[in-house]
Amino acid sequence: MVGDPNLLCGRERELDSLRREVATVPPSGRLIVVRGPAGVGRTALLRRFGAELEATQTSVVWARSRGGDHHGVNAVLEGIAEHAARCGDERLFVAVARARRTVTANPGTLRAVAALGELTEHLVVPKRCLFIVDDVHLAAAPALSLEALRRAGAVVVAAVADELRGAPSMQDVLAAADDVFTLEPLTAAAMKEILERRFGKPVDMRVELDLRAALDRWSGYPGTVLGVVEEMNVHGRLAEVGGVITRTDRRPISLPTSHRLWTALRSHDGIGTSVGLLVASMTAWPVHLIPILAAAQDGTATQYGREVDNLAEAGFLDDDGQGLLTFTCPALGQTLLEETGEPALRRLHSHLAEYLFTAELDKEPELLSEHLSRAGELDSALDGATWLMRRVQEEGHRFPDDAAAWCVGAVRLAGQGKADRTRLVSGALRFLIRGGHYAQIEEVFSQLAPQESPSLDQADDWAAARLLASFHAGIPATIADVGGAVSGRFDEVAAAWCGEGDWPPPGSALSATETQAERKQLLTAAEIHVLEVACRGDLQATSAAWAKVKGDRPPEEAVERLVDAALLADIGFVLEQVVGETLPPPRTGLVYLLSRALRDYRAAEWSAALSCLRELEVTGPSSTRAHHIGRLLAAEICAQRGETRNANEWLERADEATEVRALRCCVRFGLSPGHTGQRRLLNEAVEILVVPALGQAEPGIGQLLVRAAEAADTQGDAECLALLEKEAERRWSSRAIPDAREVLDFVQGIASRDAGRARAAVASARRRGHLPLAARASLQTARLVDDPLPWLDEAAAIARRCGAVSQLAAVNTMARDRGLSLDRPSEPVQPFTEVEIDVLRALKAGAGNREIAADLWLTEKTVEYYLSRLFNRTGCRSRVELVAALFDGRVSLAGADSATFARRR
């Protein structure tokens, strides 16, 4: 894919300049040099330009220089021979053979160059001719052969690596050129377009951000970016999830081993490898510590200092201005770590740790801790595990993230029998849990042997850690795994959440009082009981259980939020509210991703929510409660955005269990806008809602009442609407659902045409920070008040922020029917991309998909994808409506017109 002209983006200015250069060519010919660093896209630009000229009946000869070809004559001869074969020109083929004999007899001489010039005249005289010579810098002295081509009257476009522009031979080429174009790195927007063209699908924003962070200044080099994503794709690290290309793991991104940066770095072996490994493994390395590294490796400071200078001059390392060495391309450092291997890296850190300890460098305890946490086997008397845990106790509050790594390192080093391992593990686990470092908890348990078990006084800590980690990883831990009194109350909740066992988990009795030992546990029985009853949706029991933990009865609204989160499997929010002061929620993993997605959904940040849900889909086992709720949430977002196919794909992967049928029905309301579909779903919703048992809530009941009321109102079904109003009143009176008051206000506002109730629903949704529901309530309020404009503006603003095209269309329809003009955003939230603008111009000019594909170097399938995206972004439902919107100004192209497209064609 690297060098593919179909992936060229962001080079219109350079292409236009090249077109102007060849528009009028003097008899003496023209030499144009395109220079830029490797991977910046020189080859793709030249191929695109050459293809354009070939379409105008220009003879285009392609050549690529190589090493060992002194003047580059042989590369050009091969290009002419290939051109003769393509054209079937026998006379030219004979002339090439004659020139080859001369060149073979006179290698690297001026006679060989003269023979090339004579041959070029045979090609140039009949018609216009263009020579494209790539990688000119690989030839030793190419200037003479390029000038020979130009003297024959040809247009020569030569590509040169910017890294070699200072070489004398390249100076000769630049001096001989009629014009020189320098290619700069592409913008982030252009790189996004290239990635989307490569896959024919949108790319998740996390992929873009991760590539930018890993490649740094090279993130604007299409050759490098495409090489990295191809490598990731081949190894299964990219996948399509919900119609979007997403990462399947969170491992650091590395460069392919074929990349020139890695090839060049490999030449700096020995000292260079040691320096590079330290910088890469520790992210940054202080320059002033180079003498310590040299002494630990039995070298001299001069040797190591010189190698650091060499690595910096070669562009591998950089000084951040504060005396810290970093890799200019972090992905290059990751490649070094992967290719060197973990054993060699641990040996290096062990040598440094032992040197620091034996040299009694008391001024560098932080450095010793860093190396010990990464070290392997130690040969000295240094008790690394004890040292690290002492540092955790002394400095853990100041450097919590560093201390988490010290805990993992201490457990690993304690395996050598130099410390009381089980007691040390308990201390490490307590610190990790209290800091919310759940990923490191998994690392600790992965280092323990199956037969290792805690003592009786440590069992509860191990149990709490194992079970909390099971939420993070999505892998259930059982009582047999962990033991401890706490596990008997918590393992059923964790196992059910991880997909093993019924949800919600069965309740259990709680003793009236807690013992002193129970109060010292990381997770007490009372705290676990709050989680149990909240997962069952029991508001009253949750309030009572939480009051026992807090010491006083919590506010009703707080209890509702807690139960709502528990029903949606948002264990992260529940734990944060109940035990957050002592056990912070995780910042990575399944629990974190679902919590963040739900938060972004309510805040109308739907793109961010979908990004989290796609990451969740490829994280951990696929059968956890978080995955099933996440799929339904993703389906809901896609349905509201008009992305029907993606919504159906998410819905098919979601669990069809009874306890999530309300959520599934809500999604299907968004997927069945027609009268018949809404009628069928309304009947199904009534069957779900109107049930006698109210002892146990299920997720989505309140949301389904809202959707069903909207559908009944649209259908004009007063009888059904009255039934739903009665059901909402029943749910409110029995406190059967978390948001019962808000739902009742919404339903009564519709059923009774009560504007006050509708406004109360808006206020409640705003107070809870649930913007999508606030938008729905605002739309209903607008139907009932004399001045609907403020309510329509609010609903429209939220719909635009979400990208909810169906809701935005409903708002626009109501405004149009009332003769109102909505507030327009000063500029679109996301401007049209270059390709989208080209497609819109083509549509306005009346072009069909095949014509658009041919002009824009796209496949017809890719054109269809861009059309679908444009429909979603503009709210138009068809090509005809989109073209009409272009002509009447509803969709603006900032001055683009059909003539622009016609000229390009």
Image (cartoon, rainbow, N blue to C red):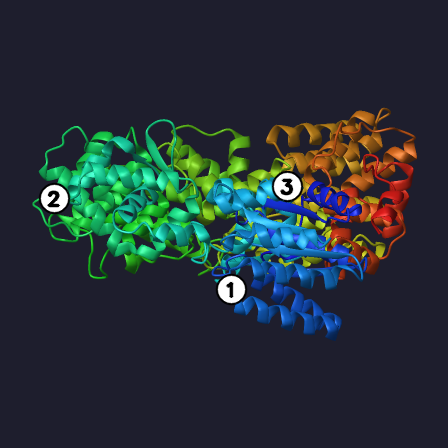
Badge 2, how many Cα within 10 Å: few under 14, some, many 20+? some
| 780 relative to 439 in the view: left or right | right
User: Given the image, on which type of amino acid does mark 1 rest?
Assistant: Pro
- The label on residue 174 is none
Q: Nearer the viewer, mark 1 or mark 3?
A: 1
Q: Residue at x 43, y 36 (%)?
A: 576
Q: Three-letter amino acid code at disc 3?
A: Phe
Residue 655 lies left or right of residue 491; in this view the side is right
* Tags 1 and 2 touching, CB below 8 Å: no
Mark 3 lies on a secondary structure that is strand
Q: In the rendering, which numbered label is found on residue 383?
A: 2
Q: Is residue 70 visible?
A: yes
Residue topped by disc 3: 181
Q: Comparing marks 1 and 2, which lies closer to the viewer?
A: 1
Residue type for callout 2 = Asp
Disc 2 is placed on an element classified as: loop
Q: Secondary structure at mark 1?
A: loop
Left or right, 883 with respect to 739, comes to right
- Say few, some or many: other residues with alpha carbon within 10 Å of mark 3 (under 14 / 14 to 19 / 20 or more): some
Q: Which residue is mark 1?
A: 107
Location of residue 653 in the rendering, given as x and y in whole percent from the top left corner: 59, 61
Q: Observer-nearest residue: 336 or 829? A: 336
Residue 220, percent from left and from top: 56, 43
Q: Is residue 149 left or right of residue 466?
A: right
Q: Quadrant of residue 314?
A: top left
